Every structure is written in structure tokens, then in C-alpha cells.
Image: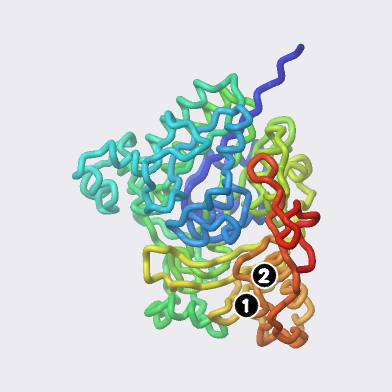
Amino acid sequence: MTQREPRQTVVLMTDATRWDMLGCYRDTGVATPHLDALAGSGMRFERAYTTQPVCAPARAALFSGTWPHTNGVWANNQAPGRDVPTLGTRLSDAGAATGFIGKWHLDGTDYFGSGRCPRGWDPEYWYDMRAYLQELTPEQRTASRNPRTVDAIDVAPDFTYAHRCADRAVRFLEEHRDRDFLLVVSFDEPHDPALTPRAYSDRYAHHTFPHDDNVTDELAGKPPHQQVWAGERLSEDRQEYERRNRQFFAAQEFVDTQIGRILDRVDADATNALVIYTSDHGDMLGSHRLYAKGPAMYDEITRVPLLVRLPGTTPAGSVNPHPASHISLAATVLEHHGLPVPAYLQGPSLLPALRDPEVRVTSEVFVEFGRYEVDHDGFGGFQPMRGVFDGRHKLVVNLLSTDELYDLGGDPGELNNLIGSPAHTSVRDDLHDRLLHWMNTTRDPFRGYHWQRRPWRADAPAATWDHDGMTRQRPDDPAYMPRLLDYTTGLEMSETTRRK
């Protein structure tokens, strides 16, 4: 009997890398040669989106295949529900080795994690940020969190989190070359404090990120909460505005170097592995006079880099122009490993698109927002938002603010809010219908008639207590959850969605 080749997957992540910080997407002067080479040997997704532009919710969706509103992580420092298996659990239960190295941010504690390996991952390789800090003296810990450290000393590569994560990833690949495995390497860089050796930070001392017209956006006709977020930046004269962030850009090049070390080992020991690179979200970098990330759905923070290589499947150097979402990555990994994709997972596999870049696996992608972080009172607090993008038009509904519609075909900078445009009524209402359908079918716990009855929706039905009168139970996940029971009979449900 012929032994099959091992099924292997390597997922590489950085934190806060904008889609256009990679040279394969846009020449910005930020050097990313190793990721560019990965794009050249695989497929680049031109329009990939996160599920929520905040660290923990994005990661929860990526590693569970369920939306933040489904898995319970709709803000930072929340943990997924106990009945939400991650990819580590599913693959380890199927006999694969599973290593998670890097930032986890899904145990409900704090930014650094608990240091405890969750179910499904190999404790020998577990290395969240608390584990890193526990290797340091108190003085080193403080230095590791201070961006000014790069000016005080020449930071050694092996002091950084990125380098230590890459070391462990290389060892995992060497030791598991003949086994089925899932390896995740989740870097914190280029997220601040963005420590790098001085040679990297010196290269970007005078670097200016290319100008985009939306850095001068005065936010007229935009949601009021964005104006609050912009604060004093609203009154700035931005005609000579330059986008500089020495450490952020330096850390992107540095982490690219560490990714290169891992890819070299993949090429030596896991030549047939599925390799995925992405980022959890982007960074506003001053666009729309906003900073960091938060309750907005502009491309600067929701559109992410997504590079995928599967030898023998992905055409080298190919580009998929269609919308794609992080919600599809879990199903993609399971299908690659020959495992069933349960109905409980909420995104289609990307494997058909990996075979043919002209294939569009979904008609639209969705993005949501709940809260930036449970711990913090700031960052806008609770901001219930849901958005949909069909490849050209983007609709954003915000219950506590005003809504947005953009035509990215003619307005890629998302400057002109068309929510009240009579010429766009048809496309707006069609996107709205798709959004409401998605909220229903994914059992969004925040759904209700208030999302339907928007000031601009002339044909919205009257509010009723029963709304659509449906019961929507959790879809099947046979390996981890028994089939649910019908409340009125006590018998197994016949249909997940039915009249109440």
C-alpha cells in the first residue's frame, strides 16, 4: 500500500499590516521581499477582508471559521465559547501535530495572554506573549514594551518576539517534516512597540508613506462618531501632511525577514505544504484623519493582505480579483487536510479559487464591529456595526450613528458617502437585503427589526414583536455537538431554521 504524502499547513500572521504595506500590492518603499516572493510563487487575493478590524475578534473568526458574533469574541479580551472548537482542536483530534507560536489573544485575559496552552495545541510549542515576557527580567520586560528602546540601544535580533517565534517555528518544521501538521506563527510585529535592530529603524528614519487623497477627508457627511474619533485632527491643515511612522515600517521589514527564515525551512522540509499569509487587520495611518483601528469599515483597516501557496494547485504569480474573507480560511485548511467541513462553519473553502483565480467563491463579504475592547472605556465604546462589500459597493450600517454607502469603483478612497443618493437606491437596498439575510442565517445575536428600519429604507416593514417569526438553531457539528432538540417536542430538530 502506497503511503500518502503528509498533509501540512503553515499559517503566517502579522498584526496591523495594511494590505498595501506589501510590495506585491503597492510600492510604498516598505521592503517585503520574502512575502513578495511568496506571492510570486502562489496566489495573491486582491480583495481580502477581515471579519472585524480588531485583534481578538479577527483571530477568533480566522481560527474557528465562525463570525465574532457567533463565537462570542466581539471585542478584545473576550474568549470564544466553550463549545467553539478551533482549528487546533479539529486537526489534533484527527491525528495531526498542531503548533501555535505567537500572539493568541483569545483566552479572555489581556493583550499578552495567560501563558497556558489551550486544548488542541502542542504545549511544547505554545509561546504566547506572556511566555515571552516570562523569559525576561523585569527591566527587560519594560524595555520590550517601550518604543524608545530602539533609540537607547541597538536591539539584538534575538531579543525580539518575532525572532524568538521564528526560531520555534523552524524547529517545529524540522521535527515534523514527515507528519500531518498545522503550524501557526502569529507575530505581534509590526504592531507597536515595534522593536527592531537599529539598522531597520535607521532605514525608515525619513521614510514617508505615499500620499492618498483621503488623508484630507474633512468627514463631512460621515458618521458623527468618526468626527469624535478624529478629534483635533479635524482642524489640522493637511495640505502638506506626511505619513511617517519609522518603527511601524521598520518592523514590517524586520518581520518579513523572520518570515523569510520560516519560508526557507518550509521549502526544505515541507515542500507540498499549504502556506497562508495574512494580517488580522490594517491601520488607518491618517486616512480620513483617523488613527490605528476601530469602529469604521474603510479599506485601510478592513482590507488585508492574503497570500496563499499550494504547490500543484495555485498557479504561480496568480491574482484573484474577487472578494474573499478570513471566514473562509478554516474551511480551506480542513478541506486541504481531507477533513469534513461541518455546517457549523460559516465560510466557504477557498480551494476552488486556489485552483482557478477566476473563480469567485462568494458574492459578497461581510464585516462587523461590536467593541474595541472590554477592558477600556474609550475607543468609542459599544459601536454596533455591520457591513457588506460586493466587490464594488460597500454598505455600512451603524445603529448608534449614521450609515454609509461607497462606490469603490469610482471612489476608491471612500470619500463620498452615497447613503442618501437617489441614484444608488437600488444597489443600496440590495446590499441591505443581503446584509439582513446574512445576519439571520448566521444567527447574529444582535439582529432585530432595528437593523431593517433605517431612515433611508422607504419600504421597510413596520416593526413587530415577532419580526420574521423564525427559530434558528445552531447548525450541525457532529464531532463536537449533538444534534439539537426541538423545544416543543424534545426530539431532534428536523430543520435548523423553521417557523416558531
Q: Which residue is mark 2?
A: 394
User: Residue 376, position in %: x, y?
Assistant: 37, 66
Location of the C terminus by quadrant is bottom right
Residue at disc 1, secondary structure: strand
The secondary structure type at the circle numbered 2 is strand
| In this view, 65 is above or below 451 | above
Q: Residue furthest top?
A: 1
Q: Earlier in the sequence, mark 1 or mark 2?
A: 2
User: As drawn, which residue projects farthest toward the left?
Assistant: 139
Q: Amino acid at mark 1?
A: Glu
Q: Which three-letter amino acid code belongs to the residue tagged 2? A: Lys
Which corner quadrant of the image does residue 297 belong to?
bottom right
Q: Residue at x 52, y 67 (%)?
A: 370
Q: Position of residue 61 (x, y in %)?
A: 58, 52
Tell me: residue 134, above or below residue 30.
Answer: above
Residue matched to label 1: 404
Q: Quadrant of the N terminus?
A: top right
